[in-house]
Amino acid sequence: MAPRIMCAGIGNLFFRDDGFGVEVANRLASMPMPDCVRVEDYGIRGVHLAYDLMDGYDALVIIDAMPMGDEPAGTVVLLEPEVPTSSQTDDDGDPVPVMDAHTMSPLAVLTTLANLGGSVDRILVVGCQPETIEEGMGLSDPVAAAVDRAVEMVSELLTELVGDLLTNVCQPAGRETRR
């Protein structure tokens, strides 16, 4: 069976830099990809992504704007979080909402997937430090400049994932790269 990889751009175009993942996914979608790779702009449709993942994927690459504290706007990182296998709670110990049609939290999507009985073996997040997530259209200059770096990073990552999955080799969790 051929490996299946989902590459999902997420974010809200109406909140400036929150549209980063959408922009990267749209650029990637115009590039040639192996048949086993599906690139989609999910925007704020988290429930849709969770249900699509129920079709069975070996790996998920999420592309999103991620506030990371003191990092300068436009910093692009690669993270490999733990794969949720059951319901998750937030920092206050409250259950993460299973279905929230108004947000696209990757944790909520993955928790919904787990609650539906689905799973993904490997999850990677390509994130970018936003400069602003205020209402408005268009990425800030530093985040717009980071789109090309992110497209390159995701392209290399997808090539690596396809090779890893075809040879059934997985890298350890916890990897982080900054560019």
Image (spheres, helix red, strand yellow):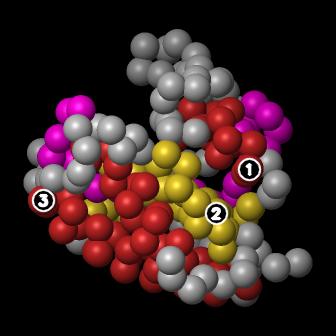
**Dot 3: element:** helix
Q: Could you tell me which residue is drawn at 31 percent across and 62 percent down?
A: 77
Residue at the spot of label 1: 52
* Image quadrant containing the C terminus: bottom left
Q: Amino acid at mark 2?
A: Met
Reply yes or no: does residue 126 show up in magenta.
Answer: yes
Whether residues under marks 2 and 1 lie with C-beta atoms below 8 angstroms apart, the answer is yes
Quadrant including the N terminus: bottom right
Q: Along the line of sight, which residue is nearer the eye, 159 or 43?
A: 43
Question: In this orientation, which residue lies closer to the viewer: 153 or 93?
Answer: 153
Q: Left or right? Give the position of 139 relative to 6.
A: left
Question: Is 12 positioned to the left or the right of 52 in the image?
Answer: left
Disc 1 element: helix
Q: Is residue 74 above or below residue 98?
A: below
What residue sits 23% from the left and 67% below the top?
Answer: 146
Q: Earlier in the sequence, mark 2 or mark 1?
A: 2
**Closer to the observer: label 2 or label 3?**
3
Image spot of residue 149 (x, y percent): 28, 74
Residue 77 in view (yes/no): yes
Q: Secondary structure at mark 2?
A: strand
Inter-mark Cα distance, 2 to 1: 9 Å
* Residue 18 falls in image quadrant: top left
Q: Position of residue 98 (x, y in %)?
A: 65, 24
Looking at marks 2 and 3 on the same chain, the residue that comes earlier in the sequence is marked by 2
Q: Which residue is mark 2?
A: 6
Can the viewer see residue 176? no
Up the image or down, 34 lies above or below 88; here it is below
Residues rendered magenta in the picture: 113-135
Of tags 3 and 1, the one toward the viewer is 3
Question: Which residue matches tag 3?
Answer: 141
